[in-house]
Amino acid sequence: MSRIRRIILCAVAFLVLSGVVVPCLHAESALGMIRKRGYLLWGVDVEGGAPYAFPDPRDPSKLIGFEVDLAGAIARELGVEVRPVQNAWDSLIPALERGDFEIAMNGIEITPQRESRVLFSRPYYIYTEQLVVRKEEAAITDFGKLKGKRVGTLSGTAAQTMLEKIGGVEVRIYSGQVEPYEDLATGRIDAVLLDLPIAAYYARPNPKLRYAGEPVGEGFYGIAVRKGDGEFRDRINAILGTLMQSGELKRIYEKWELWDKTQERLLKQNTSPDGYVGLEESRKAPLYTFLPALLKGAAVTVIISTASMALAVVLGLALALSRIFGGAPVRSVAAAYIEAYRGTPLLIQLFILYYGLPNIGISLSPLTAAVLGLGMNYAAYEAEIYRAGIEAVPRGQMEAALSLGMGRSLALRRVVLPQGFKIALPAITNDFIALFKDSSLVSIIAMVELAKTYSILAVSTLRFFELGLVVALLYFAMSYPLSLLARRLEDRLKGAGK
Amino acid sequence: MITVKDLHKSYGELRLFKGIDLVVRKGEVVVCIGPSGSGKSTLLRCINGLEFFQQGEIDIGGIELHSINRVRPSRADDETLRKVRRKVGMVFQHFNLFPHMTVLENIAEAPVRVLGLSGKEAEERARALLRRINLEEKVRRYPSELSGGEQQRAAIARALAMRPEAMLFDEPTSSLDPEMVGEVLAVMKGLAQEGMTMLIATHEMDFAREAADRVVVFDRGEIVEIDTPERIFTRPRAERTKLFLSRVLRR
């Protein structure tokens, strides 16, 4: 009986799975579906994506770049159109697996750990890594002189792995290609190691920067398709072969000034190559091996949140007092500050603070910018919380203090503020926990805190799930004691009279 | 001690005082009675500088409140205001004890912070006052742990700790349960007997009759009549006094 039931259950489950889940996971071959649909979905990150794929400066509604040309050629050979799908570079592979698009092609290096998740086409470009320094730099002449230096690169790239292998290099991880060169020009870092096409487009035209030494390392960009789309991959390989034979690929690369002697080897490289030794071990490594890196990230998170909260508390109090007790001009300045900071996204404020200020000659370190950005933003919220707290203290309290001969500021400090603080405490705690989690936003200005550490580790090992759980747990382990502490403080204050 | 001359006060369009005159001599106990909203409390708050007035003069032991610029006070103006408040203590209808401080801290706070007494001196002063009003065992308690009557007595002690020359009482028993009114009035009577200059706004007619040197009858922002309690309560001259007394005494 139970056995029959189990069989029925399995059958139903199978039907449900095949009926609901499998179509999303491409029951049909990708090739067939693309043909039927008439277009190919291509996962790409166009943000700072030159010369790969980026919005045409003359007509930003149009994408240009050598990969745009290549994707166009491939689609043409397939007899369909191509539609780019914007996706953060870090997560192109997971998005491909999820089924957001059929191919991911965006300077994705062929590495063993990626090959364990997706299928790669034959290489379409042989990349090298180019070291870039400031014009006046004398000490860093080539790749071998990087020990003890601050070197920027992109998250999850082969360059990152190379830098980490040297040891003793302070690697700064960015998620866009423009920012590392910006930071190099303003002196926040000492060098940038990135794929040659990136350097050619972003660094070569910059008069403040220059190449240091010959390109190093060598690897292949491949087009990623889902495991199971082997037939589709073979078709792409055939198309790439045709494009190489016909010289069309060369013409595309020449157009983008990317053709060099190295690329001639592409023809011979007609199978997916053996990558250099990658992070294969780390993919299988037990979770605790990541703990030191994660704890270091957590420490940075704690430092940033505590420092910015301290700033928010002090600045917020000043704002609240100005708003309640200040003269008309002071009052309106405080109100304007609060409205401006509450009414604009923190992300934009951080961008302006870190990447915008250097335009007018002010260059802040990542930590300073992070603390200032978060602190100044949260000060606006704190100010309103304090104002509510202070205004909730009965007027009679101030009057009683004044009638005893106290001055206004003494009365405020000794009588009104302590009571206002007690009223505001739950909201302050709430705000601090929110700030604590918002601190993950500062990863966009090259601060490697906990969230950034997670994305770096997850991108290079592709273990988004387990690492994600560990990181979430770490965040919770840090914020929950804060709630407990606040609750205890509240209870203690409650003991101190109504 | 306290001289009020031709006091005018209005709230926007609403004119409350249209010229009030009142003199409180040293050691005198003056009780203000009259319907709610007739201006008793406002007069007290003007004398303490908590409210400001548009016209007229208030002189407190030689300090002129009317010369203070209340719109844009200078440092000297603030100082004058603090001097006035050090001369006259104030007791409020809702006690206004500081809830985050113990009874002792409530009383010692201003002597330490304003007069510059040492913590020890202030504590001795506070304990002596609390002994006098029978509240010494509550020194370490918070206001929320005290009954209303105890809170108001502590508030009186807090004002007295500044050693004021005069005391203002703004309806000190109005928010108390009836059984607690007596203990507060007893403390006030004791103060009166010791010769404290007092100006009291109250609805306690018996207290006015027994403790006042003079009674001031307020009605709609005007002083209707000033006289000894005996005459006010037995032979009032003004119609409005009679009307008010007939209303409150019938109860």
Image: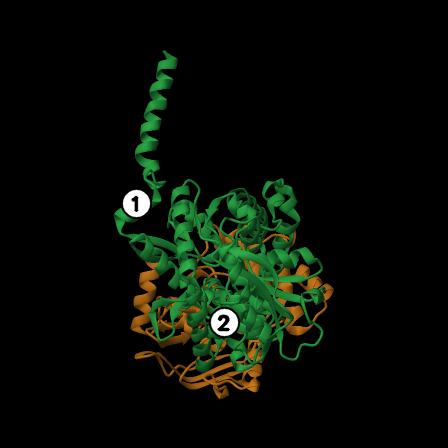
Chain colours: A green, B orange
Relative to B122, is A290 above or below? Answer: above
- From the viewer's side, name the closer residue of A310 and B103: A310
Q: Where is residue A95 in the image (x, y as percent from the top left)?
A: 42, 49
Give the x, y percent position of residue A13: 35, 27
Chain bearing tag 1 is A
Estimate the x, y position of residue A108 in percent, counting from the top left: 49, 55
Mark 2 packing: few (<14 Cα in 10 Å), some, or many (20+)?
A: some
Residue lying furthest front: A245
**SS at mark 1?**
helix
Does A208 sit left or right of A38 as displayed? right
- Residue B220 in view of the camera: yes
For the N terminus of chain B, the image quarter is bottom right
Q: Is residue B156 in sight in this rendering?
A: no
Amino acid residing under circle 2: Tyr
Q: Is residue B100 left or right of residue A82?
A: right
Q: Which chain carries label 2?
A: A
Identify which residue is drawn at 70% across, 76% down. A138
Taking depth in this image into account, of A243 and B118 the one nearest to the observer is A243
Callout 2: helix, strand or loop? helix
Q: Nearer the viewer, residue A152 or A252?
A: A252
Distance in Å between CA atoms under marks 1 and 2 = 36 Å
Q: Mark 1 points at which residue?
A: A33
How crowded pointer 1 is (Cα within 10 Å; few <14, some 14-19, many 20+) is rated as: some
Residue A132, position in %: x, y?
Answer: 60, 71
Q: Respond whether the residues carrying marks 1 and 2 are from the same subunit.
A: yes
Q: Mark 2 points at which residue?
A: A201
Left or right for A160, reference B12? right
